[in-house]
Amino acid sequence: MNVIKNRAPLITQVVFLCSILIIISTSCSNPSFKATPTVDSNPYVWMTPTMNSAIKDGGLISHEPCGPPCFFGFYVNDDFKSAVETLNDIHSTENVATSCVLDKSEVFQQIRCPGVRISSELESNEILGIEFSVDSQVTVEALIDTYGEPTSLEVFDLLDVHNPSMRMRLLYQDFWGVIFLEIQPLIEDYHVEPTTLVEKVDYLTEADYIQLSEGTIPWRGYGYYGITSTLDFSE
């Protein structure tokens, strides 16, 4: 009798574990887009971008399928739900398995997918910002050849204690855009040259762009630029 009593819980545990494994296997086999909702997330936290081959340059230089400030057919101030559907279409077409997350707070909401983040206000449902990582070799030279010299710029100390580093972002008033350049070691001033790579792009509302541009410095051409701020709040 004692042997039977000790074996019963073990059999139950084995059955339970097998059930869990079956559920996990089934859910992982579905490559379709799925946004997992979370609550009370900070809408301004940008997760480390993951490159996505479906995005390429996001139309920044190629203008495919459209150019700044358009991103795959939608703009800042467009409907948030339509943008989510567009992201769904992008990933479905490319058959890319993604782990997109829908964050909501009391005021804001955002959808985060590999290499893309779209944010909006809950009440208006209008897009406030579009962010995407550039998955191609876009240089500063190509950017300036296409849009001319930037309106202004900033250089940030990223405050990484273990790996001191900095980055530059270029502001373009014509399309309320912010262009993030590659990170460099914090050894000397930031060295921007024709071959410096673009890593990320933000399209903002006019109001947010104006606020962000306060304290920026003029573009002086290629060369070295000192730190203008100790923290990049968009990271």
Image: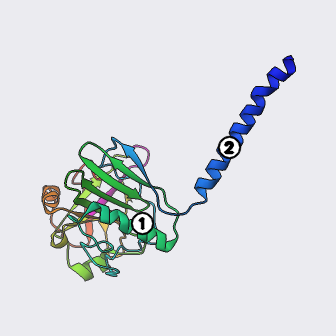
Question: How far apart, in angstroms, are the residues tagged by discs 1 and 2?
Answer: 30 Å
Q: Are marks 1 and 2 in contact (CB under 8 Å)?
A: no
Q: x, y (%) of residue 34? A: 46, 58
Give residue 173's mark.
Answer: none
Q: Which residue is mark 2?
A: 19
* Secondary element at tag 1: helix
The magenta segment: 161-169
Q: Does the rendering let one see residue 163?
A: yes
* Secondary element at tag 2: helix
Density class for disc 1 (Cα within 10 Å; few <14, some 14-19, many ≥20) is some
Q: x, y (%) of residue 76? A: 22, 65
- Residue 221, quarter of the rendered image: bottom left
Q: Identify the amino acid type marked 2.
A: Ser
Residue under the point 38% across and 56% down: 112
Tell which of 88 and 193 is nearer to you.
88
Question: Which of disc 2 and disc 1 is earlier in sequence?
Answer: 2
Q: x, y (%) of residue 19? A: 68, 43
Residue under the point 22% across and 59% down: 126
Magenta region includes residue 164:
yes
Q: Is residue 47 left or right of 204 when viewed as pictured?
A: right
Magenta region includes residue 134:
no
Q: Identify the amino acid type marked 1.
A: Asn
- Residue 193, quarter of the rendered image: bottom left
- Residue 222, quarter of the rendered image: bottom left
Quadrant occupied by the N terminus: top right
Q: Is residue 171 left or right of 83 when viewed as pictured?
A: left
Q: x, y (%) of residue 159? A: 34, 46
Density class for disc 2 (Cα within 10 Å; few <14, some 14-19, many ≥20) is few
Residue under the point 39% across and 43% down: 161
Observer-side mark, 1 or 2, equals 2
Give residue 88's mark.
Answer: 1
Q: Does the rendering let one see residue 53?
A: no
